[in-house]
Image: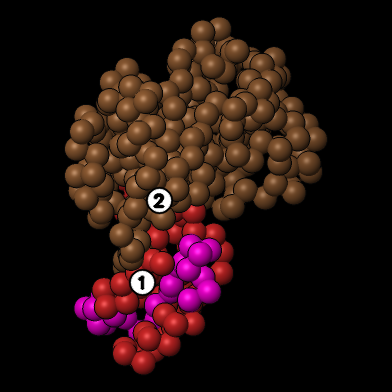
Chain colours: A red, B brown
């Protein structure tokens, strides 16, 4: 029901020459993680790590991926979040 | 590390509920506050064409990238004077409930009409959050009277509000604030700190509303903590 826009993902991986990619999916797209993993591996050869945890929004990106040598995080279902100090 | 966000747009054509236009006209809703979640933004122009008989008002809040984009955290200070109702294009309740919550401090409440992309309409009203609001008001009262307050902070970069939360100390010099840090809030850990009388949430404001039951000692959001007295005394839906 929702477009994965895999071409954009593959283009970005090639553009930044990523060897290790973390993919973060909202719950509704998590069942398609294997489809994404296989496409990335086949088209770019990059290793894929699937984020198991939450994906509440662009305000909720995984921490600590740098230490694992992840070159690129691809997060589905959101657009860049413009954080403001304090609420609202 | 680079980050790429992919919006996962809805791949079918958005349908309007066959009864939507009649419903809007019947209720004399001529000025519509139009919102959509990101998956549906690329079809908003076509939706606007279908609604050409109405005045469509779209706004952009600071945290969003696009005019008309709705986030679940858009829960504060909705100026409702310019619209007769809100129309949300998208699925689920999470996002449109933000439009109801955003009116909790207003005197009147504008209907939030949700049009599912498959063409089904439903209406959210204050009844959908009545019990949450009642509990929330109770937590506001409790915050006002308690001395030992736990401030919950997340390390998520997009939600972390540690420095703004320090303003609580100046605002309430007679209270003692303890600061707790976590990634996802570990609700099952809250009871391990029995000296905390009530909690202030500084992470996503929806945690302070939607997850109230997880905070047995009550929780309010940081913004509301800073204006607790005003919120408890002004005429609003919260105080009904």
Density class for disc 1 (Cα within 10 Å; few <14, some 14-19, many ≥20) is many
The answer to whether one can see residue A82 in this image is yes
The answer to whether one can see residue B171 in this image is no
Q: Which residues are the magenta region?
A: A10-32
Q: Do the residues marked 1 and 2 share a common chain?
A: no
Q: Relative to residue A76, is residue A54 drawn left or right?
A: right
A23 in the magenta segment: yes
| Quadrant, the N terminus of chain B | bottom left
Residue sitting at x 53%, y 39%: B206
Question: Is residue A54 placed above or below B36 in the rendered structure?
Answer: below
- Checking the image for residue B119, the label placed there is 2
Residue sitting at x 33%, y 65%: B11
Chain of residue at mark 1: A
Check disc 2 and report its element: helix, strand or loop: loop
Residue sitting at x 38%, y 66%: A2
Check disc 1 and report its element: helix, strand or loop: loop
- Picture coordinates of residue B234 (x, y %)? 51, 8
């Amino acid at each position: 029901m929702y477009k994965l826009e895999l071409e954009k993902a593959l283009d970005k991986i090639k553009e930044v020459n990523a060897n290790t990619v973390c993919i973060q999916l909202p719950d509704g797209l998590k069942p398609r993680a294997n489809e994404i993993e296989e496409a990335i591996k086949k088209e770019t050869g990059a290793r894929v790590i699937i984020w198991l945890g939450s994906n509440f929004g662009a305000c909720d990106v995984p921490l600590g991926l740098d230490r694992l040598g992840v070159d690129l995080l691809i997060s589905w279902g959101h657009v860049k979040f413009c954080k403001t100090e304090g609420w609202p | 590390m680079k980050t790429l966000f992919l919006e996962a747009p809805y791949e079918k054509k958005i349908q309007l509920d066959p009864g939507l236009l009649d419903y809007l006209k019947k209720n004399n809703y001529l000025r519509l506050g139009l919102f959509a979640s990101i998956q549906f933004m690329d079809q908003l122009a076509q939706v606007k064409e279908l609604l050409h008989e109405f005045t469509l008002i779209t706004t952009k809040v600071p945290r969003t990238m696009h005019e008309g984009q709705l986030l679940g955290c858009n829960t504060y200070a909705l100026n409702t004077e310019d619209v007769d109702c809100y129309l949300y294009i998208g699925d689920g309740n999470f996002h449109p409930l933000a439009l109801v919550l955003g009116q909790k401090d207003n005197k009147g409440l504008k209907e939030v009409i949700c049009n599912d992309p498959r063409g089904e309409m439903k209406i959210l009203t204050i009844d959908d959050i009545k019990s949450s609001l009642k509990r929330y008001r109770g937590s506001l009262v409790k915050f006002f009277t308690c001395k030992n307050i736990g401030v919950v902070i997340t390390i998520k970069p997009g939600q972390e509000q540690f420095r703004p939360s320090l303003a609580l100390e100046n605002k309430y010099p007679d209270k003692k604030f303890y600061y707790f840090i976590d990634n996802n809030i570990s609700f099952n850990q809250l009871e391990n700190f029995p000296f905390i009388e009530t909690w202030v949430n500084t992470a996503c404001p929806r945690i302070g509303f939607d997850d109230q039951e997880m905070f047995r000692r009550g929780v309010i959001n940081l913004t509301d903590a800073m204006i607790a007295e005003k919120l408890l005394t002004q005429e609003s839906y919260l105080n009904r």
